[in-house]
Image: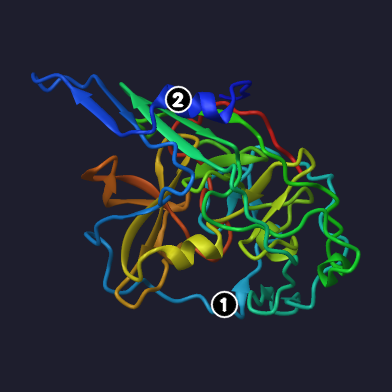
């Protein structure tokens, strides 16, 4: 679950000791404790193995003509769709459709999309991860540890306000997320609720792929230089693995960038040409099973894979998700 914490940043660092600790019984028992440093500037991603990544994915998405994900929520798992727990979308999306969206072709151009102005750094940001037995506990301020954000609320002088009036602020949110560190595939996939579907290793929430109206959030909502923005509760978040993390990942191979609520990893996977997979390379939950580096061990397991086309990361849960509050926006 995610709960607000009343501890201070200093007390948290002191309690964790700011060191990496790994202990295990000499008999090979599974009892272990691993604590990741509380240092705010710690590198949030780690390159993994290129094993099981094909030399070339099945295709390449044109960043100037990305398929639009509007009307692509479903009531059962399906490739290209978000299996959504919510079926009645009565909320409002952005006020105006941007010129980067071509409704005639059903595509949008990421190279011409409006970007919220501003470059704001967050020195108080942190990301702490601890594994005890089969439980992964993540503590974060829900602020990016390495990246900047735009200026919110969107200023009246910002050209982006013509398309999105986002009046919300970015606030520090001291939260605790408890996930399984030994994820298992459930008997059947489950739907994705509005709000958080996971957390990225730079300390920021990952939300599902749609806005309050059920539209393609990445295409329609006006976001900042790192593809993030705050919701009505002032929670900063992304709707897919943001461009700044994609750009920071190695040119080839597999990189763990976060965790879904069911405990499975979210990866950036690039082929020999540096391309991301397409939906055609993934299953109905937007993932696949292959050899990846997970908690320091190369192992064959299920994982979600980032794309630049809807639904971007998690299309449905293959495991049992941890319960979290709904952060609708």
243 in relation to 100, above or below: above
How many callouts does the rendering have? 2
Determine which quarter of the picture holds residue 265: top left
* Image coordinates for residue 222, horizontal then vertical, percent: 75, 63
Kindly identify which numbered label has been placed on residue 176: none
* Front: mark 1 or 2: 2
Question: The residue tagged with tag 1: helix, strand or loop?
Answer: loop
Q: Are marks 1 and 2 in contact (CB under 8 Å)?
A: no
Q: Is residue 43 above or below residue 104?
A: above
Q: Position of residue 220 (x, y in %)?
A: 74, 63
Q: Can you say which quadrant of the picture contains the N terminus?
A: top right
Give the camera-side residue of 8 and 183. 8
Going 78% across and 47% down the picture, which residue do you hit?
169
Q: Position of residue 184 (x, y in %)?
A: 35, 32
> Could you tell me how far apart the alpha carbons at marks 1 and 2 are, in whole angstroms?
45 Å
For label 2, the residue is 14
73 left or right of 321?
right
View extreme (right): residue: 156
Instruction: Out of 133 and 144, give the one closest to the viewer.
Output: 144
* Figure check: 187 above or below 303: above
Q: Is residue 173 left or right of residue 140?
A: right
Q: Quadrant of residue 59?
A: bottom left
Q: Is residue 246 visible to the viewer in this orientation of the structure?
A: yes
- Does residue 297 appear left or right of residue 41 in this picture? left
- Please report the residue visible at 27 percent of the width from the left and 51 percent of the height from the top: 292
Which residue is the site of mark 1? 63
Report helix, strand or loop for mark 2.
helix
Residue 102 coordinates in the image, percent (x, y): 74, 78
Q: Determine the residue positioned at 60% across, 41% down.
A: 142
């Amino acid at each position: 679950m995610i709960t607000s914490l009343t501890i201070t940043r200093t007390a948290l660092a002191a309690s964790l000791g700011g060191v990496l600790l790994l202990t295990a019984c000499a008999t090979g028992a599974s009892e272990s404790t691993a604590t990741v440093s509380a240092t705010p500037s710690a590198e949030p991603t780690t390159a993994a193995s290129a094993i099981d990544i094909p030399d070339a994915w099945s295709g390449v998405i044109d960043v100037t003509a990305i398929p639009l994900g509007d009307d692509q929520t479903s009531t059962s798992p399906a490739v290209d769709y978000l299996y959504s727990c919510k079926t009645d979308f009565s909320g409002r999306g952005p006020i105006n459709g941007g010129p980067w969206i071509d409704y005639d072709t059903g595509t949008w151009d990421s190279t011409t999309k409006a970007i919220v102005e501003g470059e704001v750094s967050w020195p108080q940001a942190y990301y702490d991860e601890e594994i005890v037995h089969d439980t992964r506990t993540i503590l974060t301020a829900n602020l990016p540890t390495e990246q900047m954000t735009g200026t919110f609320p969107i200023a009246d002088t910002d050209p982006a306000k013509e398309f999105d009036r986002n009046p919300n602020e970015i606030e520090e949110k001291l939260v605790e997320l408890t996930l399984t560190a030994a994820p298992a595939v459930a008997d059947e996939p489950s739907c994705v609720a509005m709000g958080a579907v996971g957390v990225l290793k730079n300390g920021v929430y990952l939300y599902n792929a749609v806005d309050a109206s059920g539209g393609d959030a990445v295409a329609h909502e006006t976001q900042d230089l790192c593809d993030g923005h705050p919701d009505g509760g002032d929670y900063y978040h992304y709707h897919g693995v943001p461009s700044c993390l994609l750009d920071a990942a190695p040119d080839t191979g597999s990189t763990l960038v976060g965790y879904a609520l069911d405990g499975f990893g979210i990866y950036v996977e690039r082929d020999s040409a540096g391309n991301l997979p397409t939906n055609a390379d993934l299953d109905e939950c937007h993932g696949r099973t292959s050899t990846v580096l997970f908690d320091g061990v190369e192992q064959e397991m299920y994982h979600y894979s980032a794309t630049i086309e809807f639904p971007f990361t998690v299309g449905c849960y293959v495991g049992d998700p941890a319960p979290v509050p709904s952060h609708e926006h």
